[in-house]
C-alpha cells in the first residue's frame, strides 16, 4: 500500500494554487445549449506531471463555433501550453482558443505537461459560441490515473459536496466564481450524523478560482467524512465547485455537487 502522505502530495500538486424545482442530481444539470448559463470547467491543471484534455463535441444539426477562455486563480486570463491532439498542431501558450466543430464532430485540446510546476485555473465556453456544444475536461497524471469533469451549464446558489478524509483518503476542492462581481461564500461542514463540525465564510473576487486540500485548509476535517453545505449570500449569486478524491492506493476521481433545497 502506498504511503498516504505521498498520495496527499500528489493531490496537492493538482489542486493547490501555484506559488507564482431543485432536483437531487449527482451533478448540476448539463444541457447542450451554449447560449444560456455559465459553461464552466471548474478546474484544470497542467505541468508538474499533470495534463488537462478539453474535449468539445457538436450535438446540433449545424456547424458550431466555439470560443474557450481560460482564467487563472486571480481571475485574470491564464495561458496554458496547448496542443490540438486531433491535428497534432502545437498551439503554443494560449488563454483563448477559437474554432469550429462540424456536425457530429469533435475537437480535443490538451493543456500539456511541459513545466516542472503545476499551473491551475478554469475554463469557460464564452457565450459568443454558437450551436449546441457538449464538453468535458479530462485530468491525467503521469502515473496514468485519469478523471473526468463535464462543463457545467449552471452554477448554484446552494449545494452540498460530499467529502471523505477517512481511511487514508484525501479530498481536494476547487471553487470558481464565474461572475463578474464578487460573491460571499458560506460553508457549513457536518459529520456523518449531521452534526456541525465547523463553518466558514469568505469572499471570492470576480472570475476567481481557488483550490486546496480540504484538511490542510480546515485541520478540523482531518480523518473526517461528511458533507459541506455551500451557499452564497444572495440568490442572484452562485459558484461552481468540484471535489477531487484520492484513496490510499493512489487512484483518484472527481466528486460532483448535489443541488440543495
Image (cartoon, rainbow, N blue to C red):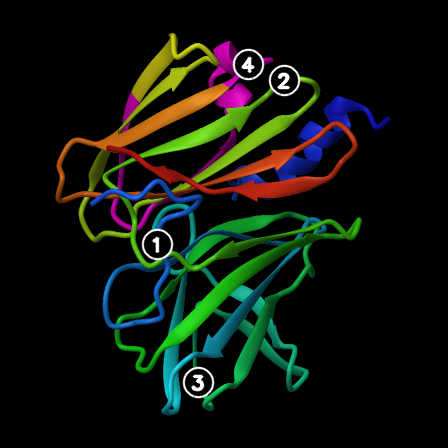
Find out whether residue 215 is within the magenta segment: yes
Q: Can you give x and y, in whole percent of width and height, for residue 178 in the image?
A: 29, 52
Which residues are drawn in magenta?
A: 201-225
Q: Nearer the viewer, residue 113 or 246?
A: 246
First in sequence: mark 4 or mark 1? 1
Q: For mark 2, does the 10 Å Cα neighbourhood hold few (<14), some (14 to 19), or many (20 or more) residues?
A: some
Q: Can you give x and y, in whole percent of width and height, for residue 240 in the image?
A: 35, 45
Say which mark, if any, is on residue 166: 2
Say which mark, if any, is on residue 224: 4
Find out whether residue 6 is within the magenta segment: no
Q: Quadrant of residue 247?
A: top right
The residue positioned 36% from the left and 49% from the top of the image is: 28
Q: Is residue 172 above or below residue 119?
A: above
Q: Are marks 1 and 3 in contact (CB under 8 Å)?
A: no
The residue positioned 46% from the left and 13% from the top of the image is: 191
Q: Nearer the viewer, residue 231 or 93?
A: 231
Say which mark, if any, is on residue 99: 3
Q: What residue did someone put label 1 on?
A: 29
Amino acid at each position: 500500500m502506498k504511503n498516504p502522505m505521498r498520495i496527499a502530495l500528489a493531490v496537492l500538486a493538482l489542486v493547490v494554487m501555484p506559488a507564482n424545482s431543485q432536483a437531487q442530481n449527482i451533478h448540476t444539470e448539463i444541457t447542450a445549449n451554449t447560449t444560456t448559463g455559465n459553461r464552466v470547467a471548474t478546474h484544470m491543471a497542467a505541468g508538474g506531471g499533470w495534463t488537462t484534455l478539453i474535449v468539445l463535441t457538436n450535438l446540433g444539426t449545424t456547424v458550431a463555433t466555439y470560443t474557450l477562455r481560460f482564467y487563472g486563480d486571480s481571475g485574470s486570463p491564464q495561458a496554458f501550453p496547448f496542443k490540438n491532439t486531433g491535428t497534432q498542431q502545437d498551439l503554443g501558450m494560449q488563454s483563448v482558443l477559437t474554432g469550429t466543430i462540424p456536425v457530429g464532430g469533435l475537437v480535443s485540446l490538451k493543456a500539456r505537461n511541459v513545466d516542472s510546476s503545476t499551473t491551475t485555473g478554469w475554463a469557460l465556453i464564452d457565450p459568443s459560441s454558437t450551436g449546441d456544444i457538449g464538453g468535458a475536461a479530462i485530468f491525467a497524471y503521469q502515473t496514468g490515473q485519469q478523471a473526468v469533469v463535464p462543463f457545467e451549464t449552471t452554477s448554484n446558489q446552494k449545494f452540498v459536496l460530499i467529502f471523505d478524509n477517512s481511511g487514508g483518503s484525501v479530498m481536494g476542492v476547487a471553487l470558481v466564481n464565474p461572475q463578474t462581481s464578487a460573491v460571499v461564500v458560506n460553508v457549513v461542514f457536518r459529520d456523518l450524523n449531521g452534526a456541525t463540525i465547523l463553518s466558514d465564510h469568505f469572499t471570492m473576487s470576480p472570475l476567481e478560482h481557488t483550490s486546496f486540500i480540504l484538511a490542510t485548509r480546515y485541520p478540523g476535517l482531518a480523518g473526517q467524512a461528511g458533507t459541506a453545505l455551500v451557499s452564497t449570500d444572495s440568490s442572484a449569486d452562485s459558484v461552481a465547485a468540484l471535489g477531487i478524491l484520492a484513496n490510499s492506493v493512489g487512484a483518484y476521481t472527481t466528486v460532483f455537487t448535489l443541488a440543495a433545497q
